[in-house]
Image: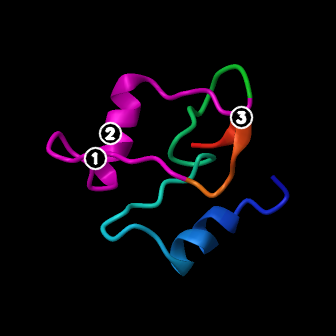
């Protein structure tokens, strides 16, 4: 929370080959809604995934380096 760019930095240091970085604050959160990170609508998240090169023929693996309740 105190270093919002840390996710991108960690991605650039190393990631699964072919992975696409998506920021929880920018790409994975709705622009309006209740809570800190409300989910986008299915149509909006599909559009954002498409912009990242993710389509119907891709497998998605969500991962991070944190544990506990906030892990991917």
Secondary structure predominantly adopted by residues drawn in magenta: loop
Q: Are marks 2 and 1 in contact (CB under 8 Å)?
A: yes
Q: Are marks 3 and 1 in contact (CB under 8 Å)?
A: no
Q: Are marks 2 and 3 in contact (CB under 8 Å)?
A: no
Q: Closer to the observer: label 2 or label 3?
A: 3
Q: CA distance from mark 2 to mark 3?
A: 27 Å
Kindly identify which residue carries mark 2: 47
The secondary structure type at the circle numbered 3 is helix
Q: CA distance from mark 2 to mark 1?
A: 5 Å
Residue at position x 39%, y 32% in the image: 44
- Residue 19 figure quarter: bottom left
> Residue farthest to the top?
34
Q: Which residues are magenta?
A: 36-63
Kindly identify which residue carries mark 1: 50
Q: Is residue 13 highlighted in magenta?
A: no
> Camera-side residue: 69 or 54?
69
Residue at position x 56%, y 32% in the image: 30
Q: CA distance from mark 3 to mark 1?
A: 28 Å
Q: Residue 69: give its label.
A: 3
Q: Earlier in the sequence, mark 2 or mark 3?
A: 2
Q: Percent position (x, y) of residue 46?
A: 32, 35
The secondary structure type at the circle numbered 1 is helix
The secondary structure type at the circle numbered 2 is helix
- Looking at the rendered structure, the number of numbered marks drawn on it comes to 3
Figure coloring: rainbow
How many other residues sit within 10 Å of disc 2, few (<14), some (14-19) or many (≥20)? some
């Amino acid at each position: 929370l105190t270093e919002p760019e840390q996710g991108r930095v960690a991605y650039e240091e190393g990631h699964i080959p072919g992975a696409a970085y998506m920021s929880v604050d920018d790409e994975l959160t709705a622009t309006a809604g209740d809570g800190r990170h409300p989910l986008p609508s299915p149509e909006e998240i599909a559009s954002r995934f498409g912009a990242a090169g993710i389509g119907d023929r891709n497998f998605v693996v969500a991962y991070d380096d944190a544990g506990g309740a906030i892990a991917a």
